[in-house]
Image (cartoon, helix red, strand yellow):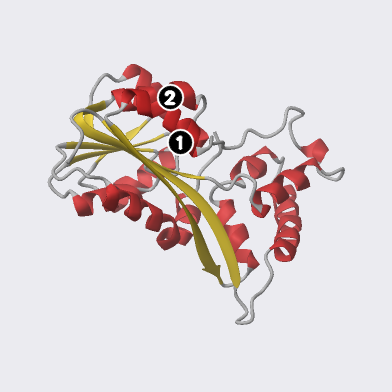
Amino acid sequence: MPTWDAKQYLRFNDHRTRPCRELVERIAIDVPKRVIDLGCGPGNSTAVLAERWPDSALTGLDSSSEMIAAARKSYPHQTWCIGDIAAWVDQNDQTYDIVFSNAALQWVDDHPQLFPKLLARVAKGGALAIQMPANFDAPAHRIMRELAASPAWRGHFPAGGIREWHVHDLATYHDLLAPVAASVDFWQTEYQHIMADATGIVEWYKGTGLRPFLDALANDQERADFTAQYLERIQQAYPVRKDGRVIFPFHRMFLIAYREPAPR
């Protein structure tokens, strides 16, 4: 797993939290008793859950001790746990009225095994609610892979390549969950983020998708050089608009699977 920087991640808190809010608003559960936020990061997604369900017992789980420390500092009244999602689903037999995850499961392996197990952690009448990025082939991601594979940089990275995040298409998740769920709700949205300039796109990915590449480099100078060359290519791929700003499209997928009995 890549290292995480809570301050870097939260530089774009409004943009990152908007999909979370839209997912939470669509969950057809009125009064859940117990809710868990898997991959809660610095607690911004858990805070959205607390806004909608202030009387619920909320737990946030994340593999990053730095993220959990930031969450505890910002939201001391919630329950926070350090842990790996895949290990949690295998070792924990508790159930929750809502098992929630916002932009985290793309870092966890073996979705065909994982997703039915996550639904099994949902109490009867509850919901599994997930949001993940769906822009793996967007220019910003292609550029980081192409740059790392270039003659100037390929020797600086592991021979087997960088372990990146991954998702399947929505039809795959339908096939995984529909046979074991009372009902499923799937949709996709392409957000159009307006950035001050192309540097904003680089700073965005320094908090997420660029982390595995930067972590693999040997020192700060290499990281700075790689980032500078990445920025040059990003500037070419995302042109400046007439107002001087840059449009940054970002495609995301959403899914909600309910357990019996299904909500009305």
Quarter occupied by residue 166: top right
Residue located 53% across and 69% down the image: 194
Where is residue 101 shown, x and y percent of the image?
A: 37, 40
Please, what secondary structure does the residue beneath circle 2 have?
Answer: helix
The label number, if any, that marks residue 224 in the structure image: none
Q: What residue type is labelled 2?
A: Leu
Q: Which amino acid does label 1 sit on?
A: Leu
Q: Residues under labels 1 and 2: Cα distance?
A: 9 Å
Residue 243 against residue 148 in the figure, above or below: below
Residue 201 against residue 98 in the figure, above or below: below
Q: Using the image as rendered, state which of residue 156 and residue 121 is in the foreground.
A: 121
Along the polypeptide, which appears first: circle 1 or circle 2? 1
Please, what secondary structure does the residue beneath circle 1 have?
Answer: helix
Classed neighbour count for the residue bearing mark 1: other residues with Cα under 10 Å, few (<14), some (14–19), many (≥20)? many
Number of numbered discs? 2
Do the numbered discs 1 and 2 sit on residues whose CB atoms are within 8 Å?
yes
Where is residue 34 shown, x and y percent of the image?
A: 18, 35
Where is residue 105 shown, x and y percent of the image?
A: 45, 36
Residue placed under numbered mark 2 in the picture:
114
Residue placed under numbered mark 1 in the picture:
105
Residue 231 shown left or right of residue 87 in the figure = right
Q: Using the image as rendered, state which of residue 116 and residue 36 is in the foreground.
A: 116
